[in-house]
Image (cartoon, grey):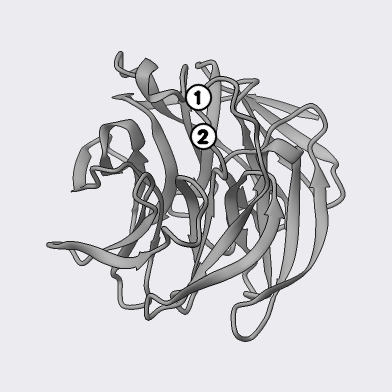
Amino acid sequence: MAELVSTPFAEGFRFPEGPRWHEGRLYFSDQHDGVVRALARDGIVEEIVKVPEGPSGIGWMPDGTMLVVSMQDRKVMRFDGTSLTVHADLWDLAPWHCNDMVVDGVGRAYVGNFGFDLYTEGTAPVSTNIVLVEPDGSARTAAEELRFPNGTVITPDGKTLIVGESWAGELAAFDIGADGSLSNRRCYAKLEGAVPDGICLDAEGAIWSACPMSGRIVRVREGGEMTDTVTVSRKGAFACMLGGSDRRTLFICAADESDPDKSAERRGVIETVDVTVPGAGWP
């Protein structure tokens, strides 16, 4: 197994999450700061939009409109470059705070949620769902009985969705129907001894998965073979994205703490490492 070490790229964030490569820049949610930011290769950071209830997953509609999850009020918001408005209200569908999201090529958004109060000690994890938001903002449950659905990707042919189930320690795969429905659930890979968080897909069908409890990123093939690991400088690695001009730069969101009450020191960082196989699919 190849062992890599990432290098610092940008720092001073409370809790960077949900990285996305879009039009030559890395977009990400500085979650506990309530801001979506963009980071250029020269290190310049721009504030894109404030999301007071906590931004998480990010994606774009075919017309270029940004979608961003608003976690605590369980909404998907639209940002047209000027105004932030509600795209979909998921309060009646998502049992707890919404989290990561992937938006496909036609503008459908698949949104996960915690399922339970993650930050209150003694609260037991429960299974939850993935909500499908159509391009017109209508929403319905797409899959159930998932144990903390987290990072999510869609294959380049648009036919398979893969999601990290944090509390199950595995990547689950679904077939995507013509109407966006999910079916034929199966285990894509078991991450032995690891908790999957944010993920991204490469052109060989392997998944890079952040592992927040161990401060590393792992690359895993379908079936569970781990081929590479990346060690980061912080206690936890929470999300990753393949980007750059050739999509061979792995951007990593890392921090010492995920608890909002413990992130005031702004120890969150973006780190990078060059890899061989480029990114593929969505996001």
Q: Secondary structure at mark 1?
A: loop
Q: Quadrant of residue 24?
A: bottom left
Label 2 crowd (10 A; few <14 / some 14-19 / many >=20): some
Q: Quadrant of residue 191?
A: top right
Q: How many marks?
A: 2
Question: Which residue extends farthest bottom?
Answer: 178
The residue under the point 68% across, 47% down is 127
Percent x, y of residue 166: 66, 39
Q: Is residue 274 above or below residue 11?
A: below
The amino acid pointed to by label 1 is Thr
- In the depicted view, which residue is nearer to us: 247 or 122? 122
Residue 194, disc: none
Q: Is residue 154 visible?
A: yes
Q: Is residue 263 above or below residue 88?
A: above
Percent x, y of residue 265: 30, 13
Percent x, y of residue 134: 46, 77
Label 1 crowd (10 A; few <14 / some 14-19 / many >=20): few
Q: Which residue is mark 2?
A: 117
Q: Secondary structure at mark 2?
A: loop
Residue 120, disc: 1
The residue under the point 41% across, 58% down is 91
The residue under the point 30% across, 71% down is 64
Q: Is residue 113 above or below residue 10?
A: below
- In the depicted view, which residue is nearer to us: 160 or 6? 160
Query: Where's the N terminus, which quadrant?
Result: top right
Q: Are marks 2 and 1 in contact (CB under 8 Å)?
A: yes
